[in-house]
Amino acid sequence: MRIGVVIAVEREAGAILADPSFAWIQAGENLYRSKAYLLDLALCGVGKALASYALARLACLPPLAPHSGSVKSEPGVFPLHDLYCALGTAGSLGNDAVGSMYLCRQAVERDMDTSGIGTPVGITAFEAMEDAVMETCPLDLALAVVESCAKAGIKLGWGRLLSGDSFVSSPEAAQQLRNSFGHGVDALSAEAPTAMLVDMETAALAKLCLLRIARPFFSVRWVSDNADHEASGSWEANVKRSSEDLLRVLKAIVGLSSGDLQ
């Protein structure tokens, strides 16, 4: 199984790109391919438009011969990957601990608003969407990822990501989002914590995987702040630590790619 990974900024990906076990080669600006695994990675930048562009670049890559780093001569396929995931930081809309991590197979585009023509907020007009909550990852795949991470000593909770092109940094805005999109947050076991998180990329990726390229997608997010007045300073202080934990998560995901992720 070939996996495509999107990470917003280099500081979140620092430990991953520095790890020699992946044998990364650079395949273009902010685009990396592993010679060790069926794995490609794009740094997208901040926001939904740049995230969408990065996913398109990943999906259109030509096949890479394993371990050689050379592009195969046969025609490529679209999309190239069997699975896409996003890794990075997120703000919590609750009191989730900084450093806690969540697998999110549900995403909402919180600033998609065509309510003026009768479409509920979060739903893209004229698309096959019945709910603002986009569920993009099969349950068995999500459980396999959580189990693999648990074996590596990584605890993942279950969460929902609300994405938009603004940085949520007030308790009032956080409460409004909880009220609007807090119904039915994913909770697959009584022991697993649930969280509502905010970022600026995931919903765009989820939408493309769901509505255009028909591939499973999930995001793993490291809580860097609590979406309040201290959010920007908290992110700056915690991003390096998040990078090291996300490296462990990616290794657990890659460890499944030739086994349970079929």
Image (spheres, rainbow, N blue to C red):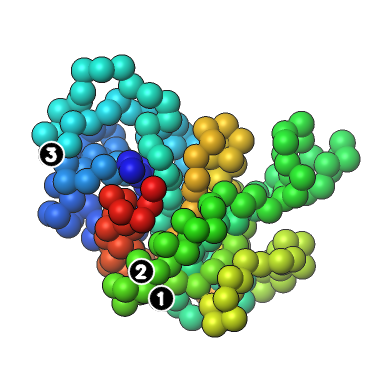
Instruction: Give amino acid for label 1.
Output: Lys
Helix, strand or loop at mark 2: helix
Residue 56 placement, left or right of 119: left
Is 242 above or below relative to 254? Answer: below
Q: CA distance from mark 2 to mark 3?
A: 25 Å
Instruction: Give amino acid for label 2.
Output: Cys
| Label drawn at residue 149 | 2
Q: Which residue is mark 1?
A: 155
Quadrant of the rendered image containing residue 151: bottom left
Q: Which residue is mark 3?
A: 67
Residue 9 lies, in percent from the top left, at 37, 51
| Viewer can see residue 43 | no
Q: CA distance from mark 3 to mark 1?
A: 31 Å
Could you tell me which residue is drawn at 53 percent across and 39 percent down? 209
Instruction: Give amino acid for label 3.
Output: His
In the image, 243 versus 67, the foreground residue is 67
